[in-house]
Amino acid sequence: MMRLTRLMKFEAKIVVARISEETRKATIYLNPEFARKCGIREGDVVKVSRACRELKFKVKLLETAPENGGIIPNSIFSNFLADFDGFKSFKADIELSEGDESTEEDVISIIMQKK
Amino acid sequence: MICTACSCLCDDVEIVDGRVLNACQRGYRHISRYREGKTRPMVEGKELDVDSAIEAAVELLKSAKSPAIYGLDTSTVEAQKIAIEIAKKLNCYIDDNSSFCLGEFVEAVLKKEVPSSTLDEVRDRAYVIFYWGTNPYHSLPRHMSRYAYYPRGAKRQRGYDEDRFLVIVDVRRSEAARLAKKNAKFIQVDNDLELVDSFMKALEGKAGKYEVASILKEMKKADFNVLFGGLGLKYGLRGNFKAFYELLSNINKFAPLYFIPSGFHVNMRGFNETLFEAVNAVNSYSFSSAASSPEFAFTELLKRERIDTALIVGTDPISSLPLEASGNILKLKKILIDPRNTLTSRIAEVVIPSAFSGIESGGEMVRSDGVRVKLKPIAKAEVEDVYVLKRILEGL
């Protein structure tokens, strides 16, 4: 059955921070209460978009994430979405998505296209 | 051995029968996996020997019209000194990650614009301990337990819940913020400058947005308080460092407060101090202009397309810089010196392997508080930064 929230987009505060859990995958750590309100569950894939750029992230839930959003670990994924004005935190749109999370190769290929 | 995973440079890590003891999770990963994912010498995608890769690097630098040297925050002081010599010889730019990390804070400490101290003094004497815009739980996992909050110090014998007062300032209730219970305060900020303003007002006996008079009252009880400032504080100040330094100065008229920048690459402070000794600037330096300027930061040089070649040492700009800067890296000729395969090693024209400083090579590093530490490697790599950089310098 289609989830209603699949049609909705939510504004989220994204904090870029170091997370000890080692991952080179695109992971976003959402505040559990924020995720519940948005109808997003752990393991979902969400599209995070900002300033005409977007990537897909696998969702994990984390109590220490900001109440109105989530944490993206400092990585090629966070830096693809950030700029120097919003290097540590920025606002972005989040929506449920399908398929797999973005990979480092995806980001590299976008950068290559920019060249 | 000395753990080189972060700028705490913990000196009590031991390797016993191949097991890494006393290290935090971050240190354990850094030490136990140093043999994995090592770079091979490459030129234009072809694997060659190290000497050929060094020669190719020299030729690229010789033919460069506008080169820059960037990185070096995981290299030893000895390697940093040679890199500065290379920049001098090439009459080019040199910069490290501190230009977008905590370089401004270290510069203020080195210029004695703010009072600073050592982690040993913090352990022995500190009462009020601020973590402002840094979450040591993840970024400096043993900072609180080994150096700051938890240990009993010479003048702090009664334990953290009586003899310390913890203040966490963050935009979210981080893991460190969750420790702020008894004898502690957590301040959740939206705008760090408003908190600066609240402290300024409290010093004048006025109320501000945040209740901070109780913290000042606690500080007054002690002869030593400390504020660890991280990247969240830097970016939260939105360039208004003057307001923060003024706050530190005003608080110090009321009660002693020392400032230690915290949460950066293992030897970023080493680079800042080494360059400062050489040219009186901590980063973003142009030998051609004989000056330091924000426009000479590597990120700005990339954005403005002012360089054609980069010698990158021990850092991964493709991964660590925002797209507005990293997007232009592909337009450069890139020489990478790094022990580990990274996204940058995939796109560099020349890749020269090196050693993990502190694990496979010795030398000196500078802890986040300015204390110099001699590394005690447990292995020996075939080549290391000092060897490669010396060869490049000779080749030029």
Image: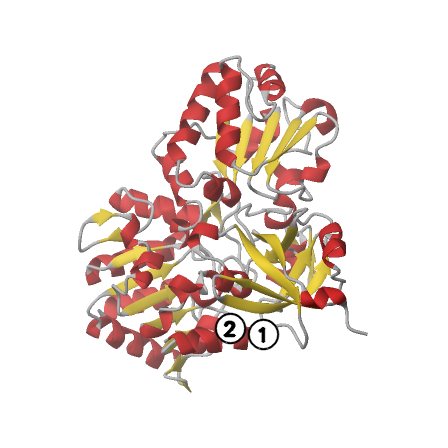
Q: Residue pushed farthest top? A: B205
Quarter of image, res A21:
bottom right
In the foreground, B91 or A108: A108
Q: Could you tell me residue A108's position as x and y percent?
A: 48, 75
Q: Which residue is drawn at 61% across and 41% down?
A: B143
In the picture shown, does residue B291 fall above or below B203?
Answer: below
- The reply to whether residue B82 is in sight is no
Per the image, label 2 sits on a secondary structure element best described as helix
Return the residue at label 1. A103
Check contact, mark 2 vs mark 1: CB within 8 A: yes
Q: What residue type is labelled 1?
A: Thr
Quarter of the image that includes the C terminus of chain B: bottom left
Indicate the position of residue B19 as horizontal and vertical percent values: 70, 61
Q: Tell me which chain the residue with mark 2 is part of.
A: A
- State the image coordinates of residue A49 (x, y, percent, origin top left): 55, 64
Image-quadrant location for residue B250: top left
Q: Does residue A49 appear in this view?
A: yes
Residue at (58% x, 36% y) in the render: B189
Q: Which residue is drawn at 53% across and 54% down?
A: B376
- Which residue lies at the image location 58% right of the left edge and 74% below the top edge? A103
Mark identifier at residue A107: 2
Q: Which chain carries label 1?
A: A
How dense is the environment of label 2, judged by Cα within 10 Å: few (below 14), some, or many (20 and up)? some
